[in-house]
Amino acid sequence: MNPNVPTARFPIRLHRYGHAAVLFASLITPISAQEPTTPVADAPVYQVGDTWTFSTVKANGDPGDTTVQTVMAVSGNQTRIDASKNGEPPYEVDLNNQGDMFRSGDTTWEPSIGWLSFPMRVGKSWSFHDLKRTHSAIADIAEDVKVVAFERVLVRAGAFDAYKIVIRGVYAKHLGGGLAVQIHSTYWYAPSVKAIVKFETGWTNYHNGNSETTVEMTAFSLAQ
């Protein structure tokens, strides 16, 4: 073979470049495969003795009312919690199998309050309609709910990875009078502690203007 013939070199160069391309691809493929994904959370599994403490945060940042909630009984479809506000005698709070509240003292929601839906993931949305009953009124509540992010949220109990959920809806009383209220709420559900760790809610009507409330978790203890 004539060593001066250059065509024999091209396959060698291409072969070398081909190896380089394969090596480069092998380097970048695992990186793209390891891109972070947001988790999917299943419904919480409560245990007797799970305890959470929540405080209302005043406008100046000081804590307001404090409520301690402790799981007292768990069945297949329902969890019963004893809740005590500011050290007063406890009242009953009931959750369904989604961890969604349908009773708090003498207030009930039919079928439930509609804040949680599992499996939970970013981008999930649902519409909810419930009747809220108290001793003096019945309210018709229609809400649109969406999970908008999975992020770190800082509250007095610590820092938690949590789903950020937003609600927009209308709260209309059937009994006791009152104008329809526009609801706008944001809250963060942390799977690691099986609870909404921060809740910011507000409402607007033409008669009373705006109102804002913030509640956050200040302590917790999960049964082993």
Image (cartoon, rainbow, N blue to C red):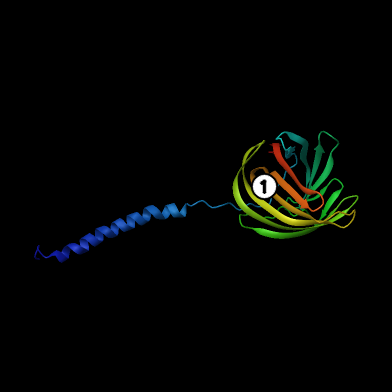
207, 60: nearer the viewer: 207
Residue at 74% across, 45% down:
212
Please state, as top left, top right, bottom left or bottom right, where the N terminus lies in the image: bottom left
Where is mark 1, residue-wise?
189
Residue 210 at x, y percent in the picture: 76, 48
Q: How many residues crowd mark 1 within 10 Å: few (<14), some (14–19), many (20+)?
A: many
**How many numbered marks does the figure carry?**
1
In the depicted structure, whether residue 124 falls above or below residue 59: below
Residue 57 at x, y percent in the picture: 73, 38
**Residue 147 image-quadrant placement:** bottom right
Residue 91, can we see it?
A: yes
Residue 97, can we see it?
A: no
Please state, as top left, top right, bottom left or bottom right, where the C terminus lies in the image: top right
Residue 60 at x, y percent in the picture: 71, 35
Residue at 48% across, 52% down:
35
The kind of residue on which mark 1 rests is Tyr
198, 90: nearer the viewer: 198
Left/right of residue 34 with respect to residue 212 in the rendered view = left
Residue at 71% across, 55% down:
168
Residue 125 at x, y percent in the picture: 66, 59
209, 212: nearer the viewer: 209
In what element is the residue under mark 1? strand
Left/right of residue 212 with respect to residue 150 in the rendered view = right
**Residue 46 image-quadrant placement:** top right
